[in-house]
Image (cartoon, rainbow, N blue to C red):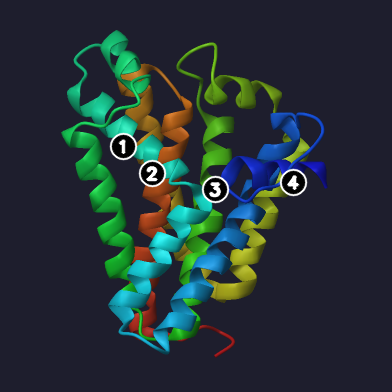
Amino acid sequence: MSGFVGAVQFLTRIPVRTSYAIPHSKVVPWFGVVGALIGAAVGGVAVGLGELVPASVAAALAVVAGLLITGAFHEDGLADIADAFGGGVTVERRLEILKDSRHGTYGVAALTGSVVVRVVAAASIVSSASVFAAFVAAHALGRTAAVLAMRSAPPASESGLGASAGRELSPIPTALGVVAGVSIVAALTGWWVLPLMAAAALATAAVVVLAVRKIGGLAGDVLGAVEQVTECAVLVVVSGLAMHHDLWWR
């Protein structure tokens, strides 16, 4: 279970302490499961507040709760990537911008867009059960997508998460972690998992292809962008599915 604890440490601001450093090879396979737990917490906030305030307010506060739980970890990556890819002319300049902790116009626009899409998509879902399922699926598939990206694309440099984690991952534990994340979504959403997986795959592919073109591969910030774009895509797809279909257990 050390990998699970390490994933909680890495992906959230929950104060979990260990007496030793847990290697990425054990931590990364748990990303999908921990993502599902984060999504459950965010979805719980949305459902609970949805009984007290308008859906738009509940959705906004749920997204804010997610930001607090994760420390806006992935949002920072998305903003950095937007600044680098939007403002950098050369590969060297883009990599330099990625190392800058400040956010520019492109980064702020991307960050704002991500929050707006998530809030509006969640607020448009009428069923409380579907809202809960949407957040669990979005967070689980978002982190699972980042794991798959590590296995499918080269690193942009010889250091950083994109390089070290990709080299350290073992095929079997990683595959089991991916299956676990997808299985949680499938158990909760039934056949919806198929279009949700398709949306996640397209979102991941778009970010990875862009990263390879712009900087030659993956970096830690790219993985954050993968999570964010996938999370948004999944919530948008659920908002469409929920207009015409109920969850299998409803």
Judging by the rendered image, the residue that carries numbered circle 3 is 143
The image quarter containing residue 29 is top right
Could you tell me how far apart the alpha carbons at marks 1 and 2 are, in whole angstroms? Answer: 6 Å
- Badge 4 marks a residue whose secondary structure is helix
User: Marks 3 and 2, how far apart in space?
Assistant: 13 Å
For the C terminus, give its image quadrant: bottom right
Marks 3 and 2, the one that precedes in the sequence: 2
Q: Amino acid at mark 3?
A: Arg
Kindly identify the residue that appears in the image at 27 percent across and 33 percent down: 82
Q: Is residue 124 visible?
A: no
User: How far across and how far down the image is residue 41, in percent?
Assistant: 56, 67
Q: Which picture quadrant has residue 22?
A: top right
The circle drawn on residue 75 is 2
Q: Residue at x 69, y 47 (%)?
A: 30
Residue 79: give its label: 1
Secondary structure of the residue carrying tag 3 is helix
Q: Pointer 4: residues within 10 angstroms few (<14), some, or many (20+)?
A: some
Q: Which residue is mark 4?
A: 5
Q: Marks 3 and 4: which is nearer the front? A: 4
> Which element carries disc 2, helix, strand or loop?
helix
Element assignment for label 1: helix
